[in-house]
Image (cartoon, rainbow, N blue to C red):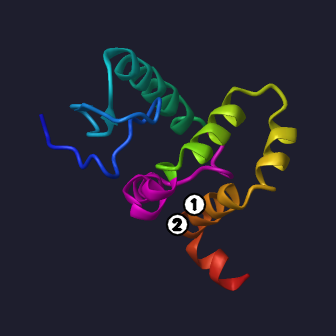
Amino acid sequence: MASLNSRTAVCVICLEKPKYRCPTCRVPYCSVTCFKKHKDDDASVADFLNSDEEEDRVSLQNLKNLGESATLRSLLLNPHLRQLMVNLDQGDNKAKLMRACMQEPLFVEFADCCLRIVEPCQRRDS
């Protein structure tokens, strides 16, 4: 098994401390349950990437950049941010929850960090 940096690595599914890495894409995960969910998510991502809608698509390189960002990993170590994201992901009224999350400075910092990685030229112009 590849060594995991326990200070920054989190399971890609549940955000807990990982024990393993996916043999295909090397992302960290903590259990068989999370690994299976990750593989299901990979299939969903593949379906999405093969769709014709490219307008709002983030490039694979930018997704990789997000995954490799030490700043994002550091932010994701915060349990409050992780809970905000879980609530947003599991909530029924995503628009309302997103408005509430955007009132949280920590979430805004997270969103801004993501945007700086995904749209660096556009963020510098504003």
Q: Secondary structure at mark 1?
A: helix
Q: Farthest residue in the left direction?
A: 1
Question: Does the magenta-highlighted stretch encompass residue 66?
Answer: yes
What residue sits right under mark 1 in the picture?
114
Q: Nearer the viewer, residue 99 or 60?
A: 99
Question: Does the magenta-highlighted stretch encompass residue 111?
Answer: no
Amino acid type of the residue tagged 2 in the rendering: Ile
Amino acid type of the residue tagged 1 in the rendering: Cys
On the image, the x and y values in percent for residue 91 come to 76, 28
Q: How many marks?
A: 2
On the image, the x and y values in percent for residue 57 come to 60, 49
The prevailing secondary structure element of the residues shown in magenta is helix
On the image, the x and y values in percent for residue 92 come to 80, 25
Determine which quarter of the picture holds residue 32: top left
Q: Does 1 appear above or below 40?
A: below
Looking at the image, which residue is at 68% across and 52% down? 55
What residue sits right under mark 2 in the picture?
117
On the image, the x and y values in percent for residue 45 come to 50, 33
Which residues lie in the magenta part? 52-75
Q: Farthest residue in the right direction?
A: 96
Looking at the image, which residue is at 35% across and 36% down? 17
